[in-house]
Image (spheres, grey):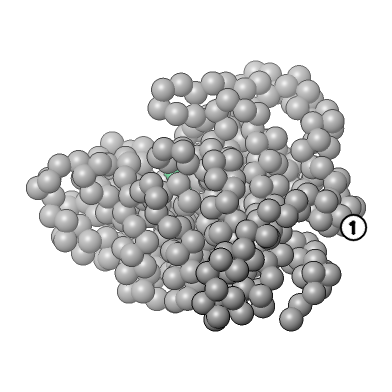
Amino acid sequence: MSTPDERRTAALQALAQQTIELPSWAFGNAGTRFKVFTTQGVPRDPFEKVSDAAQVHRVTGAAPRVSLHVPWDLVDDFGKLAAHAADEGVTLGTINSNLFQEDEYKLGSLTNADPAVRRRAVGHHLRCLDVMREVGSTDLKIWLPDGTNYPGQDDLRGRQDRLAESLQEIYAALDPDMRIVLEYKFFEPYFYAMDIPDWGTSLVHCLALGERAMVVLDTGHHAPGTNIEFIVAQLLRVGRLGAFDFNSRFYADDDLMVGAADPFQLFRIMHEIVRGDALRPDSGVNFMLDQCHNVEEKIPGQIRSVMNVQEATAKALLVDRDALAEAQLAGDVLAANGVLMDAYSTDVRPLLAESRESRGLPADPYRAFMASGYLEQVRAERVGGTQAGWGA
Ligand code: AOS
Ligand code: ZN
Ligand code: ZN
């Protein structure tokens, strides 16, 4: 039986090691399909996006990697971008391939019936692998925008066969230390059938590819009411949870700040992570954010999101797992539920402040950043040029 003090000490240790990867696109102007509001001082190129991401790491100590999109973050010299990241105290992480802006992919990219289009889509991924070699990244993230809008539009099964072949070609080109992480989404941009709509389809393809193919779980990509922590538990059980794209949804793929819509759900997810011993830095699960900040300031929005993940994690770490197991074994429904709720109801902000201060970080990263003068500085400096936005 562990004591509350022992759980607290273990939580402090685990929290000090937790890292969260930031998406470069969160720092540019982005929003809904209706209106993208512009924010002053927004980065004008990938270098400035990396600098902004580094600010989040500076105050949280928990966000040391930045994930890039190709081609949104294309630069002439990726070595220079990696060196810039190192100067700023961060590294470049996952490379996201992007197949949703080319006209030729209207009827599909990796699943297209035309072999020439499929070849070009595979070629784009091979280019992404080169970028990964240049920046020292090991994860290629594929979110496949392919799908159909009308029954009968294409052969559902044929598309799966073509997808399997295309993925196999990409997988065969991986270096030994590289992985494919494969995301799913139940709808959008197509509405009748997405080609990777769910975790089952992603898992089927990953299992066929091999051990270095893992599922990405974007928390906004499920039908309302889906039990996401169940999916987390199952993917961990079979060793195929490669990464999260964290965000909040009220309605659809809202890409709002993680933990804003449903902090209890985030806690339940992190409880399964702790239960599955997947918080360890070498567990193979990459905790990423995938968000857009349309009405709020972007860097503070990312800082708040990192803090929200840390709060949910701290609560999950405080669960009295012995008492929980005992109650579950005894069939004591209310006691078991009570153990979880006790942890969820704990105010972990003092614990997190202690964790940060013990490592020389500000107790409140959000306030520290707002007082740093960085926003005022970039608003004054970043005049001229084109602000980075959704897709650029
Ligand atoms: C799209 O809905 C997905 O969540 C992807 O992860 C995508 O690459 C990301 O949102 C950037 O557009
Ligand atoms: Zn995503
Ligand atoms: Zn999404």
Number of other residues with Cα within 10 Å of mark 1, as a class: few under 14, some 14 to 19, many 20 or more: few
Where does the N terminus fall, quadrant-wise? bottom right
Q: Count of labels shown?
A: 1
Q: Is residue 381 above or below residue 11?
A: above
Describe residue 51's horizontal placement relative to residue 358 as left or right.
Answer: left
Rendered location of residue 183, percent (x, y): 41, 56
Residue ID at (64%, 44%): 305
| Camera-nearest residue between 254 and 62 | 254
Q: Is residue 61 visible?
A: no
Write down the quadrant of residue 189 in the picture: top left
Q: Would the CB of label 1 be found within 8 Å of ligand 2?
A: no
Q: Is residue 151 visible?
A: yes
Residue 111 placement (x, y as % from top left): 24, 54
Q: Amino acid at mark 1?
A: Ser
Which of 97 and 186 lies nearest the eye of the viewer? 186
Q: Position of residue 193 (x, y in %)?
A: 23, 49
Q: Is residue 256 above or below residue 377?
A: below
Residue beneath the point at 48% across and 64% down: 232
Q: Residue furthest left?
A: 152
Write down the quadrant of residue 321 in the picture. bottom right
Q: In this image, 356 relative to 203: left or right?
A: right
In the picture, measured across the screen, residue 341 lies left or right of residue 380, that is left
| Residue where numbered disc 1 is placed | 358
| Nearest the eye: 245 or 94 | 245
Look at 25% across and 41% down and name the residue there: 191
